[in-house]
């Protein structure tokens, strides 16, 4: 299903208002740059850009199928062909790395403003595609789109403040937070600010409820379930984990480890720098660990589950029609089968008929030996190896107990991306598979 004339007429008014809003946003920015910042060059750039957006708005309001701005069909087809969970995950990791390495460039206001405008224009051009609009403009997903932009904005604000503080600390100056640390009273300063925010948010939600229908569906029925059947957006990360792990690990162990890790963080942290002010250079390891866990292993999974997982939990491209008849043939195998059958060309070790309990346990351990060896080396041998190489300084400052807790929490966190990559590259289902005990990993 691709864009058609009837759909474009329905969405033309929205796209016209959308481009007009971008034009207004850039027009205000141009005035502020001209009047307050004395940046005439940038003011002219964004004024011209605002004019271009008004042209797009007028084209969209025309409602003509040939006039409404849209991404070329060849581009949409190419994006769909290149889309996949492997490219998506590797791409998000590469983006995360680039944003960290070149953070001093990306925190520049004009760079961030340019990226915001590019993202908004691409979204507008993409919404002229019926398949893309059906997902992004779904009432359930509209708040998630807004949350993505808000998350990007507040992350940029915090990163910019951290970069400024790191530069000041390198020059021997105190961080920005120390320059204005005057204490204020809860009443009236804090309560007055909270009251204004409450009124503003209430008015916003009122207008939201008027113009965007509530996504209410028919009463639940056991004979008619939605396809795909998705959890609420804040649980979509867990639902995605269930693709790669057993429910006991993805739904119980990993979430419990996240809670435990957050509780243990103050006791594991030995670095007293960065308390009360933003900094990256003084807390680089903590910053990277948290950002990787939050953005790459949580936010990106929510986005994937919301916009790219369709019927039968198959992966769909951004401009691909969500047909329930899409079939993806996957021949996922367990590590014991890969080792004994595929590599050694031998059958899986099985106990003979009438074997005792100890004999059965022995055969199970022999069958799962490759996975047990790998998992044991990963959790038992890798932490000491890291302690004498990469994390030598951490081990010296944290001590044995705190270091081992930190190292194992980090390694267990990394089991998710490792298992995802193994599934997509080697079709590996489980590293350890013991159906006799309903225990799989």
Image (cartoon, rainbow, N blue to C red):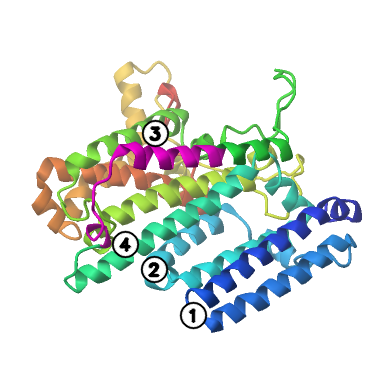
- Cα gap from disc 1 to disc 3, whole angstroms: 51 Å
The reply to whether discs 3 and 2 touch (Cβ–Cβ < 8 Å) is no
Label drawn at residue 4: none
Q: Which comes before the other along the chain, label 3 or label 2?
A: 2
The reply to whether discs 2 and 4 touch (Cβ–Cβ < 8 Å) is no
Of discs 2 and 4, which sits in the foreground? 4
- Residue under pointer 2: 103
Q: Which comes before the other along the chain, label 1 or label 2?
A: 1
Q: Is residue 188 magenta?
A: yes
- Residue under pointer 3: 255
* Closest to the observer, 360 or 230: 230
Q: Position of residue 232 (x, y in %)?
A: 57, 33
At a point 39% along the width and 33% down the height, the residue shown is: 255
Q: Which residues are magenta?
A: 176-201
- Cα gap from disc 4 to disc 3, whole angstroms: 29 Å
- Residue under pointer 1: 38
**Above or below — where is 185 with respect to 271?**
above
Q: Main secondary structure of the magenta part?
A: helix
Identify the secondary structure beneath mark 4. Answer: helix
The reply to whether discs 4 and 3 touch (Cβ–Cβ < 8 Å) is no
Identify the secondary structure beneath mark 2. Answer: helix
Q: Which comes before the other along the chain, label 4 or label 3?
A: 4
- Residue under pointer 4: 162
Q: Is residue 336 left or right of residue 122?
A: left
Q: Is residue 15 magenta?
A: no
Badge 3 density bin: few <14, some 14–19, many ≥20, Cα 10 Å:
few
């Amino acid at each position: 299903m691709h864009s058609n004339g009837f759909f474009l007429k329905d969405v033309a008014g929205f796209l016209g208002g959308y481009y007009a809003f971008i034009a207004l946003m850039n027009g205000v920015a141009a005035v502020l740059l001209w009047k307050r910042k004395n940046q005439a060059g940038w003011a002219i750039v964004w004024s011209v850009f605002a004019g271009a957006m008004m042209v797009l708005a007028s084209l969209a309001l025309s409602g003509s199928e040939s006039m409404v701005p849209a991404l070329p069909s060849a581009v949409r087809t190419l994006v769909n062909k290149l889309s996949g969970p492997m490219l998506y995950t590797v791409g998000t990791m590469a983006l995360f790395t680039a944003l960290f390495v070149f953070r001093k460039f990306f925190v520049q206001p004009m760079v961030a403003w340019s990226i915001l405008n590019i993202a908004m224009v691409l979204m507008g051009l993409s919404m002229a595609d019926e398949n893309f609009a059906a997902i992004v403009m779904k009432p359930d997903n509209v708040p998630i789109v807004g949350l993505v932009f808000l998350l990007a904005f507040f992350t940029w604000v915090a990163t910019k403040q951290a970069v400024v503080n790191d530069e000041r600390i390198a020059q021997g100056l105190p961080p920005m937070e120390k320059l204005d640390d005057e204490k204020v009273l809860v009443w009236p300063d804090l309560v007055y600010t909270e009251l204004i925010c409450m009124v503003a948010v209430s008015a916003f939600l009122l207008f939201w409820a008027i113009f965007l229908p509530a996504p209410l569906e028919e009463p639940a029925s056991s004979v008619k379930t939605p396809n795909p059947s998705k959890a609420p957006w804040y649980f979509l990360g867990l639902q995605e984990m269930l693709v790669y792990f057993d429910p006991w690990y993805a739904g119980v162990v990993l979430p419990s480890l996240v809670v435990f890790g957050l509780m243990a963080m103050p006791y594991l942290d030995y670095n007293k720098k960065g308390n009360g002010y933003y900094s990256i250079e003084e807390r680089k390891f903590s910053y990277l660990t948290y950002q990787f866990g939050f953005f790459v292993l949580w936010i990106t999974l929510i986005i994937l589950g919301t916009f790219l997982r369709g019927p039968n939990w198959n992966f769909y491209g951004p401009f691909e029609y969500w047909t329930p008849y899409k079939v993806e043939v996957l021949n996922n195998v367990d590590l014991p089968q890969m080792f004994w059958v595929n590599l050694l060309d031998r059958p899986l070790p099985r106990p003979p008929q009438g074997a005792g309990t100890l004999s059965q346990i022995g055969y199970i351990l022999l069958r799962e030996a490759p996975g047990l060896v790998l998992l044991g080396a990963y959790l038992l041998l890798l932490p000491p190896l890291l302690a004498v190489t990469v994390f030598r300084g951490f081990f010296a400052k944290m001590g044995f107990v705190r270091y081992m807790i930190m190292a194992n929490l980090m390694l267990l966190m990394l089991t998710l991306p490792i298992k995802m990559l193994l599934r997509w590259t080697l079709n590996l289902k489980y590293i350890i598979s013991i159906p006799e005990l309903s225990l799989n990993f």
